Image: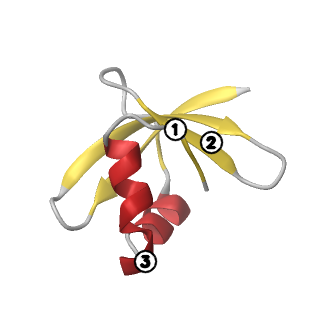
Amino acid sequence: MQGLGYLNDNITNEKILCLVRQGTYGRYLKKRKSGKNGVHLTDEEIFLNLPEEIDRLNDLKNGVPIFC
């Protein structure tokens, strides 16, 4: 099952719209270009804005699907 969500990049204050798929031990996030905001993904936002996870956040912004 999949849903719509978004998270914010704290460095650039950019809203990133995501397609969210539930996995066994986490969530798969894929960037989308338009549509409704959906659910605010607060846990994933906090995790991806950590200094050691900036590369994964940049991958998501560049269109690469990631797993959180």
> Residue 56: x, y in percent?
44, 57
Residue beneath disc 1: 65
Going from the N terminus, do you reach mark 3 or mark 2 first?
Answer: 2
Q: Secondary structure at mark 3?
A: helix
Could you tell me if residue 4 is visible in this image? Answer: yes
Which residue is more in the foreground, 1 or 25?
25
Question: What sort of colour scheme is used for the picture?
Answer: secondary structure
User: Is residue 28 rendered to the left or right of residue 41?
Assistant: right
Cα separation, mark 3 vs mark 2, equals 19 Å
Q: Secondary structure at mark 1?
A: loop
Q: Are marks 1 and 2 in contact (CB under 8 Å)?
A: yes
Cα separation, mark 1 vs mark 2, equals 7 Å
Q: Residues within 10 Å of mark 3 (few under 14, many from 20)?
A: few
Identified by mark 1, the residue type is Pro
Above or below residue 26? Residue 65 is above
Residue beneath disc 2: 28
Which residue is more in the foreground, 33 or 57?
57
User: Is residue 60 rendered to the left or right of residue 62?
Assistant: right
Identified by mark 2, the residue type is Tyr
> Residue 25: x, y in percent?
80, 55
Going from the N terminus, do you reach mark 3 or mark 1 first?
Answer: 3
Q: Residues within 10 Å of mark 1 (few under 14, many from 20)?
A: some
User: Is residue 11 rendered to the left or right of residue 33?
Assistant: left
Going from the N terminus, do you reach mark 1 or mark 2 first?
Answer: 2
Could you tell me if residue 7 is visible in this image? Answer: no
Question: Which residue does the image show at 15% across and 60% down from the upper left?
Answer: 12
Residue beneath disc 3: 52
